[in-house]
Structures are given as structure tokens and as C-alpha cells.
Amino acid sequence: MKIAQFEKLVSLVAELPDDYERSVQVRAEHEIPEPYRELLVHHSHMTVALERWYDSPVEVVVLGETHDDPFYGRLIQLRLAGTERVVEYGIMQIDLSVCGEQARQAILKHSAPLGRILIADDMLAEVHYDSFLEFAPNQRIMEALAIDETKPFFGRLASIQSNGGHAVDLLEIMPVNVER
């Protein structure tokens, strides 16, 4: 999954700007600066990584969604629980056919971040990062992702395999301010 997957994920919720290729650069793992590297370069659910980083639970806010069964996609913010502080912007697409009914309903009801739902449902899941991205501020991408950033920001394209099959594609973006 590379830039083509990014295009697919963003197209779930908004049209890409014509000049997005100048705004997004694929970066090698070692090119991601700290503290973003610690937040992005791992094989854990982002929910787990963020809750460990901030020593606080996170909650999901769904900004937009699509549902073409069995595929469900959404644009989200993860926020520190009980606050307005955004700690991740993301887009995900999941094949709901790999989920049990309880997990499927929890995802569709926005009851918790995806990682927490998959863990609670005891789904055997492997998180793989596919590429790392650096985003230059670009008005259309910032609007599509509900971001108001003025400095470059970083993210990753990742996927989740579950029960031997491909389950989820993710675009996970850190805000500029990741101070604890």
C-alpha cells in the first residue's frame, strides 16, 4: 500500500486536490523525526500507542463515513478522553465480514476507537505499516482531514491482518503538537 492506497482512503470522504502529490512525500522510517517516530514506527494498534504515550484513554469522533457492505470507511479524530485535544487524524476502511457481530455493531455505533474494539473482541490482529508520509500544509488535504496545521506533519499508511485475512487499511496522521 503506497500513495495509491492513500488516494483510495482519502477518496472515501473527500476529493483529493490536484496538487496533492507536491504536498505528500513518502519517507523512510529513519527520516521520521522524533517524537513522531515513536508514535508511528511500531506494530501496535494506534489506540494502544497513543494511550501509552499520553497516559490517557482516547475516544473516537467520526467526521465522515461510508458504508458499502461489507466495507465500512470513516474519517476520524482520536481525542484524549473528556477533552477536545486531537491526538490523531485518520481514515480507515474495514472489511466488516471479518468481525464478529458484537465488534461490527460497536464499529458502526462509533462506541470506541477501532483498536480497542478489535482487542475487546479478541480478534487476532497483526498491524503492519506500509509507508510513512510527510505532509506539507495543503488547504484541501487539511480540510479533508479536518486539520489546521501550519508546519509539516507526519503519518503512516498501515494495514491490519486478522484471522489470516486482510481486514483494515489505515491512514494515521499525527498533529504537529504531540507533547504529553
Image: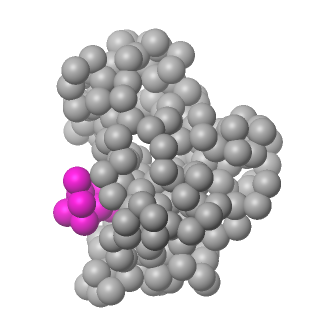
The residue sitting at 45% across, 75% down in the picture is 135
Q: Is residue 178 above or below residue 52?
A: below
User: Relative to residue 84, is residue 33 depicted above or below?
Assistant: below
Residue situated in front as seen by the camera: 88 or 41: 41
Q: Can you see residue 102?
A: yes
Q: Nearer the viewer, residue 9 or 30?
A: 30
| Name of the residue lying farthest toward the front | 30
State the residue at coordinates (33%, 19%): 99
Q: Is residue 173 left or right of residue 159?
A: right
Counting from the top left corner in percent of width and height, residue 8 is at 23, 58
Picture coordinates of residue 98 (x, y %)?
Answer: 27, 21
Nearest to the observer: residue 177 or residue 38? 38
Question: Which range of residues does the magenta coloring cover?
Answer: 1-12
Q: Is residue 175 visible?
A: no
Closer to the camera in the image, 164 or 30: 30
Q: For the point 58% across and 52% down, which residue is it?
A: 39
Q: Position of residue 79 (x, y in %)?
A: 67, 48
Which residue: 37% across, 13% down? 101
Q: Is residue 2 magenta?
A: yes
Counting from the top left corner in percent of width and height, residue 100 is at 35, 13
Quadrant, the C terminus: bottom right
Q: Is residue 117 above or below residue 113?
A: above
Predominant secondary structure in magenta? helix
Q: Is residue 71 magenta?
A: no
Q: Please indicate whether residue 104 sits to the left or right of residue 19 in the image.
A: right
